[in-house]
Structures are given as structure tokens and as C-alpha cells.
């Protein structure tokens, strides 16, 4: 049961992430949410609620993966996916906090949030999907072979 729940939450995380990013990079939606020069209230609400939903899904998946027995390589890819996704807002907040407190533009947390975390998310997600497809193909071959 928990294995199916992990994959349901995983696909929900991927789906919401794709929709969220797609809406931000679609020009008419972007202009509606963020205005021509200044963000609108709708933009703040959209980004905040999307961030809360995505972070909640990431934390849920992180806990489920840590507590459930999953194949070793798959577990590593799933943990990479969730940890990098949860790390994105954490490093963004840390960057802003350190920059605000020191009046110095801090680059380490910024690079972690903008470059390292999205790459880790993509690597983990693609690796998880590839391992899942491989496993399902192997199971189909075993099920169809005469015994």
C-alpha cells in the first residue's frame, strides 16, 4: 500500500511542478499573475500557495520514502528528488536572510537554490521514472514467461 502511495505522491509532485512552472512561463498567464512591471496580489497568492503545496508534497514524499522499504537505488533517487525540492525554498530563504542581515550579497545559498537544487530534482525524478519503467518491464516479462 505504501509503495502505491509513494508513486501517487511522486506523480502529484511532478504534475503540480510542471503545471506551476508551465503557468509561470506562459506569457499571458505570467502577465496576469505578475503584471507588466509589478507583481499583483493574485501573483503573490499563486506563488505562495503553489510553493506550500509543492513543499508539502515534497516533505510527504520524503517521509514516506524514508519509512518505506524501497529498492536501494530507487530510494536514493527518490530521496534526491524530494531533498532537492525541499531544499529549494530553504536555500532561497537562507540566501535572503543572510543577505539581509549582513548587507552583503551572499552567493552560496543562491547558487544552491537556483542551480544545484533544480538539477538534483531533475536527476532524481528522471532516475526514479527510469527505474520504475525498468522494474515494470521486468515484472511483465516474468509474468508472461511460462513457468
Image (cartoon, rainbow, N blue to C red):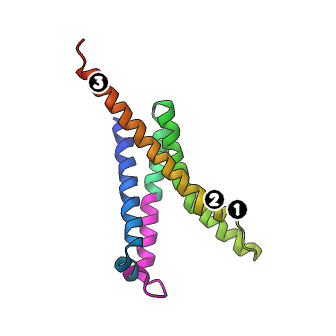
Residue depicted at x 42% and y 65%: 21
Q: Which residues are magenta?
A: 32-54
Q: Is 136 left or right of 130, judged from the image as shown? A: left
Q: Main secondary structure of the magenta part?
A: helix
Residue 99, percent across and down?
71, 72
Residue depicted at x 44% and y 59%: 54
Locate the C terminus and report the quarter of the image it occupies: top left
Residue depicted at x 75% and y 77%: 103
Mark 2 is surrounded, within 10 Å at the Cα level, by few (under 14), some (14 to 19) or many (20 or more) other residues, namely some
- Seen as rendered, the residue at the extreme bottom is 37
- Residue 86 in view in this figure: no
16 or 97, which is in the foreground? Answer: 16
State how far apart marks 1 and 2 are (Cα).
6 Å
State how far apart marks 3 and 1 are (Cα).
47 Å
Residue depicted at x 76% and y 74%: 104
State how far apart marks 3 and 2 are (Cα).
42 Å
Amino acid at each position: 500500500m505504501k509503495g502505491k502511495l509513494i508513486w501517487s505522491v511522486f506523480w502529484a509532485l511532478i504534475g503540480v511542478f510542471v503545471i506551476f512552472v508551465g503557468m509561470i512561463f506562459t506569457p499571458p498567464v505570467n502577465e496576469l499573475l505578475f503584471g507588466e512591471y509589478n507583481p499583483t496580489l493574485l501573483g503573490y497568492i499563486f506563488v505562495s500557495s503553489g510553493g506550500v503545496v509543492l513543499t508539502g508534497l515534497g516533505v510527504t514524499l520524503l517521509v514516506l520514502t524514508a519509512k518505506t522499504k524501497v529498492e536501494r537505488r530507487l530510494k536514493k533517487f527518490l530521496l534526491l528528488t524530494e531533498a532537492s525540492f525541499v531544499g529549494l525554498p530553504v536555500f532561497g530563504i537562507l540566501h535572503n536572510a543572510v543577505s539581509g542581515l549582513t548587507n552583503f550579497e551572499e552567493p552560496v545559498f543562491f547558487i544552491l537554490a537556483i542551480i544545484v537544487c533544480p538539477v538534483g530534482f531533475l536527476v532524481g525524478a528522471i532516475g526514479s521514472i527510469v527505474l520504475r519503467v525498468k522494474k515494470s518491464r521486468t515484472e511483465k516479462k516474468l509474468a508472461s514467461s511460462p513457468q
